[in-house]
Amino acid sequence: IEPAVFARRRRSHRRREAVGRHAWTRVTAFELLSEQVAPNRCGKAFASHRADAAPAQPQRLSSARDAPRNTATPRDTMAETSVKVVVRCRPLLPHETDGTLDKPPAKDVSTVDEAHGVIEIKNKAHEYAAVLGGVDRHDAMYEATAKPLVAQIFEGYNATVLAYGQTGSGKTHTMGTAFADDDADGVVPRAVADIMARRDALAADRDVAVVASMCEVYNEEVRDLLADGDELKPLAVRAVANGGGVQIAGISEREVTTAQAVVALTREGTRRRATAATDMNEHSSRSHMILTFRVDVGGGEGRSKTSSKLHLVDLAGSERLKRTKATGERQAEGIGINKSLFELGNVITHLVEAQSNKAKQGHVPYRNSTLTRLLSDSLGGTAHTCMIACVSPSDADVAESHNTLTWADKATLVKNVAGIHVVVDPKAEKLRAVERAELESLRETVRMLKTRMGAAESGRPPLPFPGKGADEPELDAADKARLLQRALDKARASHRREADRLRKTVDGLTAKNEALAKRCDVLRLAL
């Protein structure tokens, strides 16, 4: 092939891939309510796994029941949202205010205006959805970040909460992922309690399953923190067919029913997470941790089955080697952390540029890092995303704090297209296709009978039935009457079925309107 022809074919192939990832096909509200959404109707289908064993044992995909299920996002449930950014400015720590012989006490150079959502660090002001300072703000932080998202995952929406900031800025404390402490508090423990409470409230009327998994990204490798044995083997990140994002092959999943069970699991996973001491943080996280909850809610009363995910992400802190004084293995870890965070910022920059210039859609480098591949649905995808930017008020950390806030400013410009993820059953879809074909055949028969009846009343020779020859003898009056009566009975039965279907549709739309009204109330509370 000549070079020009090869380049032309390659560009065409890339365009087809882009259309497969981002193009959406309209799905009617009736199909949503009657669960008639085919797997190939939407480009954003994704696979999830069903966990059916006891909570005490890790789950693996080993049976037909555990096989991945197709889901689709109906277009009429989709809405454009922006990444919400909440800033947490911690107070000065005792070792910063005490000072040493070679290091003077730190000064607080931050000004927090919570009423207007403004933070100012050394005469540079930034405005966000919310800004929180002071001590013991876990309740306010949860209300501003994860609480609205927990309500939305039970409606079928994906959601992500991620914490970003320099090392020692308070990310792990804010997220509450230090489960080794008995009195740990933060966004994650409160989200766990809320998820379990909502599960118990829905379990009386609908089938609800909550499945937890936990992994870390260490030196560009994904490691299962809930796996059997002490050895953490790297897992592969694979793309899901039909533009459905990515999944971690072979990750352990456990169905949980109580908050205590989740705390026990996460405490075990946190014990395995890579941590080490540096000059800036005694318990520095050396990996990015992702705690995922998959919520499967059964259908009924006009509702469709949904399967959604909540990712709670505690990113490792960005660090400068000359300040952490890391060497050897710690130095290599710091370089890997900074590289993945750089690629994450690069993805955000490309998304902002592509979304601001609709005419020129650029390539977004999700594949440059394992972390960005795992967060591809959270940034520019189909999830509601909230980012917590953690900063230090110390004058020694001004440069790092400004970098964090600049990164957060770009994140506020990223737009996602969130939608309800409806579970598609291939077997039920085939049965519905057969029923639709049979109904269409009956309608064709009724139309033919009406045509013959009109021809008989007007004295014209009737048209032959499909499959009959024109030379066959005509029916007598009694046979015609019986045939017409049979057709009339079939038409009445079809009318009753259509009427019942319309009534179910109206009931389903009523339930959907009530759900949308509840969601509007949740969003108003969030705003």
Image (cartoon, grey):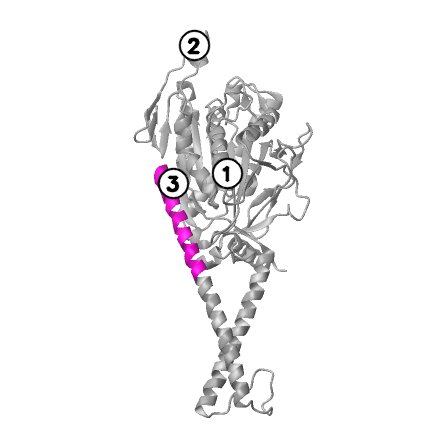
Location of mark 2 (residue): 98
Q: Nearer the viewer, residue 168 or 500?
A: 500
**Label 2 near label 1: C-beta < 8 Å?**
no
Residues in magenta, as a range:
503-527
Left or right: 497 as drawn, with respect to 66: left
Q: Is residue 521 highlighted in magenta?
A: yes
Mark 2 nearby-residue class (10 Å; few <14, some 14–19, many ≥20): few
CA distance for labels 1 and 3: 17 Å
**Farthest top residue?**
101
Asked if 278 appears above or below 336 in the picture, the reply is: above
Location of mark 1 (residue): 199
Sequence-first disc among 1 and 3: 1
SS class, disc 2? helix
Q: Residue at x 56, y 64 (%)?
A: 433
Counting from the top left corner in percent of width and height, residue 46 is at: 56, 48
CA distance for labels 1 and 2: 47 Å
Quarter holding the C terminus? top left
Asked if 348 appears above or below 509 in the picture, the reply is: above
Counting from the top left corner in percent of width and height, residue 389 is at: 43, 30
Disc 3 residue type (three-letter): Val
Asked if 129 appears above or below 122 in the picture, the reply is: below
**Label 3 near label 1: C-beta < 8 Å?**
no
Counting from the top left corner in percent of width and height, residue 360 is at: 44, 51
The mark lying in front, picked from 1 and 2, is 1
CA distance for labels 3 and 2: 44 Å
Q: How many marks?
A: 3
The mark lying in front, picked from 1 and 3, is 1
Counting from the top left corner in percent of width and height, residue 282 is at: 53, 17
Location of mark 3 (residue): 522
Asked if 191 appears above or below 152 in the picture, the reply is: above
SS class, disc 3? helix
Q: Nearer the viewer, residue 59 or 303?
A: 303
